Amino acid sequence: MQVTFKGDPLEVKGTQPIVGERAPDATLTNRQGEEVKLSSFFGNQPVVISVVPDVQTRTCELQTKRFSKELAEKDVVYLTVSRNTVDEFNQWNDENDLDLTTLSDANREFGKAYGLGVDMGGDERLARSVFLVDPKGIIQYVQIVEEIADEPNYDATLEAIDNL
């Protein structure tokens, strides 16, 4: 699969999961520096996994804040996943006066499991994307944003949540 970054094509490494498949599991690092299994969030509520290349950039910040606001009234678990370090995520949360569940894929396990690795000038990041996983761990919605510099389609994600 290819996406673009400011019009330049980028190859997305791997195979992305599709609607109807069990959500792949991966070990990530939470804000406390603890390793957690992605599957530990599945079971009680739908889970929105918002994937950003770098939370410290403008579009990623907009995406993270917008989903935080839009999902506050929804009965869902909201996760942000990126290759940012735990310290970078904690600094970002502090600077924005937020306490969001951010998960670091510094070990690259999530990127491999979800087929989202992209080489951005020698720095491997994750392709901007959104996944909705039902309480049974089945993927119900996938959005891989074609232009990494663009925000995702928030309305489509919210509609998918409402249709669960």
Image (spheres, helix red, strand yellow):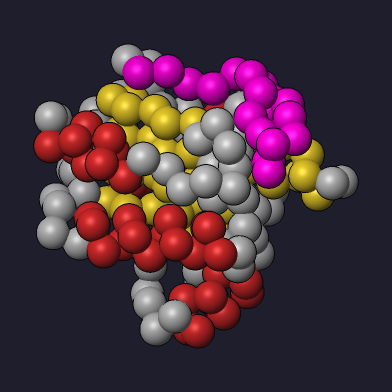
Q: Residue at x 62, y 72 (%)?
A: 88
Up-down relation of residue 50 to residue 57 (above or below):
above
Indicate the position of residue 124 as horizontal and vertical percent values: 76, 44
Q: Residue at x 65, y 64 (%)?
A: 85
Q: Residue at x 21, y 49 (%)?
A: 76
138 or 117, which is in the foreground?
117
Indicate the position of residue 143 as horizontal and vertical percent values: 42, 31
Which image quadrant for residue 23?
Answer: top left
112 or 37, which is in the foreground?
112
Residue 160 visible at all: yes
Up-down relation of residue 155 to residue 85 (above or below):
above
Residue 108 visible at all: no
Indicate the position of residue 163 as horizontal and vertical percent values: 13, 30
146 or 64, which is in the foreground?
146
Q: Is residue 6 highlighted in magenta? A: yes
Residue 12 shown left or right of residue 33 in the figure: right
Q: Is residue 108 highlighted in magenta? A: no
The residue range painted magenta reads: 1-19
Indicate the position of residue 66 as horizontal and vertical percent values: 34, 60
Residue 132 shown left or right of residue 2 in the figure: left
Which image quadrant for residue 55?
Answer: bottom right
Residue projecting furthest to the right = 122
Quarter the N terminus occupies: top right
Up-down relation of residue 151 to residue 21 (above or below):
below
Q: Residue at x 39, y 35 (%)?
A: 131
Up-down relation of residue 136 to residue 151 (above or below):
above
